[in-house]
Image: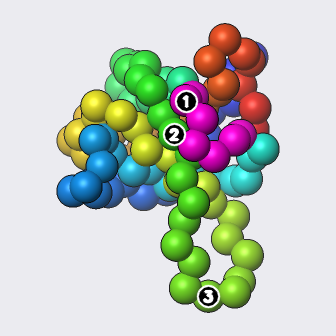
Amino acid sequence: MTDLREIKDVFSVESRPGTMVLVAGISDLPVSRKLTAIVRRPDGSTTETVAYKDWLLRRTPAVHEVEGFLLVGLEKSDIPDGSSVEIRIDGMASIG
């Protein structure tokens, strides 16, 4: 069984080698550890890449129910609206 998470937002960061995605929900995936991401597009196609969980800059003390992941080697155009993602630790089942 896969744990696909809705991608809420996608943006490029000039100083990073990939694209940041914000996903719905909170997980116990580790920060700064190499992860695997499988992006599923609305047309059913998929792309697998390396991902790193990133700390989100929070400008308010409110709790946010989203997480940020850097998807290495992907461009913003590779992740169309309506895409979802499965993030997992290399060699393990997904954690969500």
| On screen, residue 28 above or below 74 | below
Give the SS element for disc 1.
Answer: loop
Label 1 amino acid?
Lys
Can see residue 36? yes
Number of numbered callouts drawn: 3
Q: Which mark is residue 60?
A: 3
Q: Which mark is residue 52?
A: 2
Find residue 56 and report its image quarter: bottom right
The quadrant of the image that shows the C terminus is: top right
How far apart marks 2 and 1 lie (CA) works out to: 6 Å
Residues at circles 2 and 1 in contact by the CB criterion of under 8 Å: yes
| On screen, residue 14 above or below 1 | below
Which residue is more in the foreground, 54 or 23?
A: 54
Span shown in magenta = 29-35
Residues at circles 3 and 2 in contact by the CB criterion of under 8 Å: no
- Percent coordinates x, y for residue 49 in the rendering: 41, 23
Disc number lying in front (3 or 2)? 2
Q: Residue furthest bottom?
A: 60
Q: Which mark is residue 34?
A: 1
Is 68 positioned to the left or the right of 91 in the image?
A: left
Give the SS element for disc 3.
Answer: loop
Residue drawn at the location 30% of the way across and 49% of the way down? 16
Crowding at dot 2, Cα within 10 Å, few <14 / some 14-19 / many 20+, comes out as many
Residues at circles 1 and 3 in contact by the CB criterion of under 8 Å: no
How far apart marks 3 and 2 lie (CA) works out to: 23 Å
Marks 1 and 3, the one that precedes in the sequence: 1
Disc number lying in front (1 or 3)? 1
Give the SS element for disc 2.
Answer: strand
Is 26 positioned to the left or the right of 75 in the image?
A: right
Label 3 amino acid?
Thr
In this figure, which colouring scheme has been used for the structure?
Answer: rainbow
Is 76 positioned to the left or the right of 72 in the image?
A: left
